[in-house]
Image (cartoon, grey):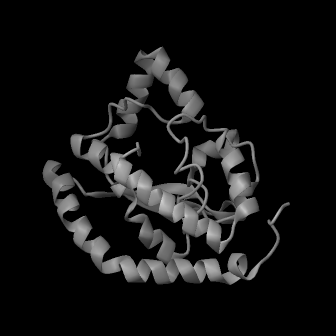
């Protein structure tokens, strides 16, 4: 049975839960970020980067992440895809690469543990994102996304796709996860996903 209609949690309490959780975690997150930022800055560049993503109702916002890639990563990606047809096919299917030449040694570590997502807590506090929701979609991916559920919610730091088969699923399959989450959205669902996220981080199955 669909539960996609309005509920107190959907309408207001989910946002309240996000804000309280971010504020309570602020100090330990900052203490964790400091040494990681120093490691990333060893190449002389900023430890953060900001990228345009699509939010609720199609609004564009700037997502914050810890930088896990080399400078001029976009040019390196285009050259790599042009030289490697298998990589091009993988990128077209998944919008990501298992062996991405742009990722730094520190970047591999923070991606594996999902620590590169920590700055998105600022996006949650600002209201661009939620702790739990669909994977934030890049602007250029809008034309290949086949669903509509994504646009009804704030994108999330974690969610169904992020804690399941994200290394194996194609990009278009994300729409199925988004529709399922919109149907199941509740406080209990979010708590279960957050608990599952802890297990994913400990297991180091991020990418």
Horizontal side, residue 201 vs residue 136: left or right: left
**Who is closer to the viewer here, 91 or 173?**
173
Q: Quadrant of residue 141?
A: top right
Q: Quadrant of residue 7?
A: bottom right
Q: Position of residue 39 (x, y in %)?
A: 17, 54
> Quarter of the image containing the C terminus?
top left
Q: Position of residue 197 (x, y in %)?
A: 47, 58
> Quarter of the image containing the N terminus?
bottom right
Going 60% across and 34% down the picture, which residue do you hit? 170
Horizontal side, residue 47 vs residue 155: left or right: left
Q: How many marks?
A: 0
Q: Quadrant of residue 99?
A: top left
From where the camera sits, is residue 39 visible? yes
Q: Position of residue 95 (x, y in %)?
A: 53, 36
Outermost residue, right direction?
1
Horizontal side, residue 50 vs residue 58: left or right: left
**Who is closer to the viewer here, 79 or 122?**
122
**Who is closer to the viewer here, 189 or 121?**
189
Going 46% across and 22% down the picture, which residue do you hit? 87
Vertical placement of 203 versus 181: above or below? above
Going 55% across and 80% down the picture, which residue do you hit? 17
Q: Position of residue 196 (x, y in %)?
A: 50, 57
From where the camera sits, is residue 61 visible? no
């Amino acid at each position: 049975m669909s539960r996609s209609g309005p509920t107190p949690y959907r309408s207001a309490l989910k946002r309240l839960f996000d804000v309280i959780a971010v504020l309570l975690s602020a100090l330990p997150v900052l203490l964790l970020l400091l040494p990681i930022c120093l490691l990333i800055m060893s190449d002389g560049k900023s430890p953060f980067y900001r990228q345009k993503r699509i939010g609720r109702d199609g609004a564009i916002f700037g997502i914050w992440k810890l930088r896990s890639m080399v400078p001029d990563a976009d040019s390196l990606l285009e050259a790599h895809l042009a030289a490697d047809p298998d990589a091009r096919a993988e990128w077209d299917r998944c919008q990501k690469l298992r062996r991405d030449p742009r990722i730094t040694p520190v970047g591999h570590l923070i991606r594996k543990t999902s620590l590169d997502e920590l700055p998105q807590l600022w996006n949650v506090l600002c209201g661009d994102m939620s702790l739990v929701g669909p994977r934030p979609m890049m602007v250029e991916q809008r034309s290949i996304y086949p669903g509509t559920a994504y646009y009804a919610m704030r994108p999330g730091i974690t969610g169904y796709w992020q804690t399941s088969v994200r290394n194996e699923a194609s990009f278009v399959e994300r729409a199925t996860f988004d529709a399922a989450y919109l149907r199941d959205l509740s406080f209990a669902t979010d708590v279960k996903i957050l608990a599952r996220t802890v297990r994913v981080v400990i297991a180091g199955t991020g990418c």
